[in-house]
Image (spheres, helix red, strand yellow):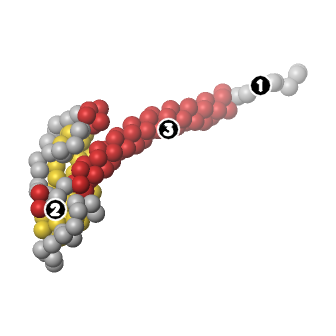
Amino acid sequence: MRPQRGYSLPEVLVALVILAIVITTTIAMFARRQQYLRESSETILVWQAIWNEAEILRRTDWKDIKSQPAFVSDTSILTPLNPFVTKVEVAPSADDPNVKNATLTVLWEFDDQHKIYKRNAHLSILRSDTGGSNLW
């Protein structure tokens, strides 16, 4: 009798299970990669809009800096994130009346079920009244 050649059924099944795990992990990794790329692109857009607004705030006279329900700058860059909310909160410093703390906020990725925004970005800026020009 000649020796049998080939693999037994349990060996083939183990090899298929290992192959299935590798393929599933690879597909899951690519799906997660797409999510990370989308989130990074959104974050870049948000920070660009925040910096645009910060530049306007920087050039505004100190006495005219006030809270606003939305950004003054053009937010069309944020259109892919609809719906989104922008706001500027300005509060005087507790330590010095010649200093204002401005917080620029963007909220996006609204969760209809929980009625909240899942993602947000904030930038806080201190503006002081130097008595000079409106540049920092």
Q: Is the Cβ of the residue at disc 1 closer than 8 Å to that at disc 2?
A: no
Which numbered disc, 1 or 2, marks the residue that appears first in the sequence? Answer: 1
Disc ID at residue 29: 3
Q: What residue type is labelled 1?
A: Gly
Q: Quadrant of residue 60?
A: bottom left
Give the spatial CA distance, label 1 vs label 2. 83 Å
Q: Is residue 116 above or below residue 132?
A: above
Element type at marker 3? Answer: helix
User: In terms of depth relative to the viewer, which is nearer, 13 or 107?
Assistant: 107
The residue positioned 88% from the left and 22% from the top of the image is 2
Residue lying farthest right?
Answer: 1
Give the spatial CA distance, label 3 vs label 1. 34 Å
Where residue 14 appears, as percent x and y from the top left, is 62, 34
Query: What quarter of the picture does the N terminus occupy?
Result: top right
Q: Which amino acid does label 2 sit on?
A: Trp
At label 3, counting other C-alpha atoms closer than 10 Å, the crowd grade (few under 14, some 14-19, many 20 or more) is few
Element type at marker 2? Answer: helix
Which numbered disc, 2 or 3, marks the residue that appears first in the sequence? Answer: 3
Disc ID at residue 62: 2
| Residue ID for mark 1 | 6
